[in-house]
Image (tube, grey):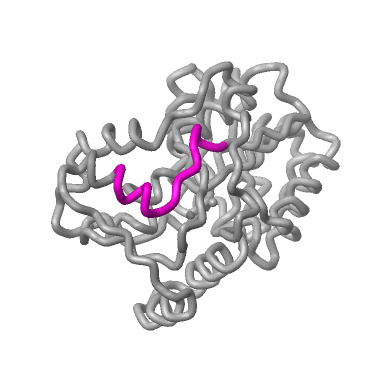
Amino acid sequence: MTDQTTNQRITLVIGGTGKTGRRIADRLTAKGHAVRIGSRGSAPAFDWNDEGGWDAVLDGVSSIYITYSPDLAMPGATDAIEALVRHAKLQGVRRLVLLSGRGEKEAQACEQIVQDSGLEWTVVRASWFNQNFSEGAFIDMVLGGAITLPAGDMPEPFVDADDIADVAVAALTEDGHNGEIYEVTGPRLMTIADVASELSNAAGREIAYVDVPHDGFIEELTKSGAPKDVVWMLDYLFSTVLDGRNAHLTNGVDRALGRPPKDFAEYARDVAATGVWDAPSLSNSGPDRKSESRLPA
């Protein structure tokens, strides 16, 4: 994906190789917009831990899609968002679209920084992604035939990354979304047992749900060598966010796009048709580090 810097201002997609970021970049490019990917592997590179390189990335940028890796709930996220907003204003950026998480007070603090920026802003506040079962943290479990998580029977309105991308693209490219907080969910509440049932139906084989104790899950995750920030994030999400605070539906997708959100069953059928869940092993190495988490967030 190349910059078209001659006659057109650029949209910077931070986390542009992640679940929502790459979908947004593809949609913007298809619409003829100039896109710059913000990632450590891009040129110029964007690294949340290297503020000195940000101005080069922001040169010529008019709009930014912001995802913070691994999650806005992480310590240090507010400082990073404050710094990015400061650099963006100095570089003449006009519009910010922030991917946030439902039920996270730390994420809401980051939202407030964006809202107080003096720039045009939109917040997309998302529930857990459908795609965690096909592109991220839990695909190994699906391939292995058992989703082993400390989730009990608490329901969550899983949202599709394609819906998030459509909302973000509308906010980045259209008028009428400034000052909006779009809290986006899927169309129904689902427990992990419900998820396992839908995945079983779509994949044509049994995928079980095994509820496990929280402490044991985190201990095994740590022993497996998972990165510390991933362990921290999963510990936080399963001990704090999945406590019922998000067990309700919202109309953010409909408000932003004028259509209902995608149902999990449709997502599962679409993914099953690609054969992703047929493989006995996985080349993808775990969570995509949440250049937009809603990792599960």
Q: Quadrant of the N terminus?
A: top left
Residue 185 as seen in the image, left or right of residue 75: left
For this rendering, which residue is in front, 211 or 142?
211
For this rendering, which residue is in front, 45 or 178?
178
- Residue 121 seen: yes
Give, as a single range, the part of the protein colored magenta.
185-198
Q: Is residue 194 magenta?
A: yes
Q: Quick check: 288 above or below 20?
A: below
Q: Residue furthest front?
A: 153
Q: Is residue 169 magenta?
A: no
Q: Quick check: 254 above or below 280?
A: above
Residue occupying image coordinates x 55% and y 45%: 127
Instruction: Pinpoint residue 181: horizontal percent, then vertical percent.
Output: 71, 34
Residue occupying image coordinates x 69% and y 37%: 123
For this rendering, which residue is in front, 229 or 22?
229
Residue 278 as seen in the image, left or right of residue 132: left
Q: Quadrant of residue 281?
A: bottom left
Instruction: Pinpoint residue 207: horizontal percent, then vertical percent.
Output: 24, 54
Residue occupying image coordinates x 73% and y 57%: 105
Residue occupying image coordinates x 35% and y 78%: 224
Instruction: Pinpoint residue 3: horizontal percent, then vertical percent.
Output: 50, 30
Instruction: Pinpoint residue 186: horizontal percent, then vertical percent.
Output: 50, 35
Q: Quick check: 232 above or below 69?
A: below
- Residue 3 seen: no
Q: How many marks?
A: 0
Q: Quick check: 8 above or below 121?
A: above
